[in-house]
Amino acid sequence: MRAAFAAVPGLLLLCSLLAAQPSLPLIIDTDCGSDDLMAIAFLLSRPDVRIEAIAVDNGLAHVRAGASNVLRLLELGGHGEVPVYIGRDTPMRGQRAFPDAWREISDTLLRDLKIPPAHHAPQTQPAADYLAARLLDHSRPVRILALGPLTNFGEALERAPQILGGVEMVIMGGAIRVPGNLGDGDFKTDNRTAEWNLFVDPWAAKLVFASGARLRLVPLDATQRVPINAQFLRELKSAARTRLGRFVTGILDRERVLIEQGASYAWDPLAAVTLVEPSVAPMTPLAIDVEQNAPQDGRTAEVNGAANAGVALDADPAVFRKTFLSALAGK
């Protein structure tokens, strides 16, 4: 496994490069859950972020329903021209999927929200083919934000194994020193270590962690430090003066029960914020492998060897709130 972070200075250099190159184009890979759309709305609100393309992964939403929702969000944000690519509707291996009830909610997220129709259709080129071809072009550097299972990248790596070498990639997923979250949604399993995104397609995740990409992982260890609670929702409603801000408020209003139960966290939004404000989640260089065998399949395990990822084991909720709310307030 190729080392991307051999020492802390290298990690600090990566963070400084990210902060110094805010206009570097961004490819987002998403499974189109509610927190994905919140993260995308935040990035659309940042004038220093240029989204080049969005690839839709099989995960919380079914791929075509998810693509439809993303296209409408792009239209709302004034960027309907951003191309959207659709991935396969199954993992690379097996038939794992998020709970059906969650997928129904994700498919119909925009049903009751006043969102304009999209004026563009998804691209006909499959997501993995697009990623393989685009990432082979090293003359045009790009960053990646991966918010769902990593199936599209796993498929792309099978086509061209060298495409991610040296590419800056932020991943929301995994659980390092905290339990996994497969018990959410009354999912019956003996697996207590995996997080949903990487559990759905652990083989694709393994390929990504062995790819030589300059990985920054935002696992449950960090996201659990940043709750989306009633106070956050009140602050958002007070601050949200833009169409995208009101969109995020509408999404969270639909999840008020989860918020009141203390079961909502800034999963994908935290990963998005790290792109523009790396101080929100300091990174620790670790060697990570993805377990393939039950009962810990999908686990992001610390292993011996050179570090291949910077991992956020903590996060600052105050920095997150300030950065996230300021963008959606139009500041």
Image (spheres, grey):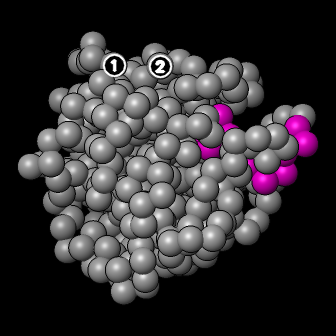
Task: Examine the rendered structure and indicate whether residue 313 appears above or below residue 159.
Answer: below
Measured as percent of width and height from the top left, residue 257 is found at 76, 45
Q: Which residue is mark 1?
A: 126
Measured as percent of width and height from the top left, residue 65 is found at 49, 18
Camera-nearest residue between 26 and 207: 207
Q: Is residue 194 magenta?
A: yes
Label 1, residues with CA under 10 Å away: few <14, some 14-19, many ≥20: some
Q: Which residue is mark 2?
A: 88
> Which quarter of the figure has residue 241?
bottom left
Q: Earlier in the sequence, mark 2 or mark 1?
A: 2
Q: Report whether residue 107 is seen.
A: no
The magenta span reads 189-200
Q: Residue at x 27, y 69 (%)?
A: 18
Measured as percent of width and height from the top left, residue 13 is found at 30, 80
Q: Residue at x 84, y 43 (%)?
A: 295
Q: Residue at x 41, y 73 (%)?
A: 5
Instruction: State left or right for residue 217 relative to residue 232.
Output: left
The quadrant of the image that shows the C terminus is: bottom left
Amino acid marked by disc 2: Arg
**Residue at the limit of the structure toward the bottom, as seen here:** 9
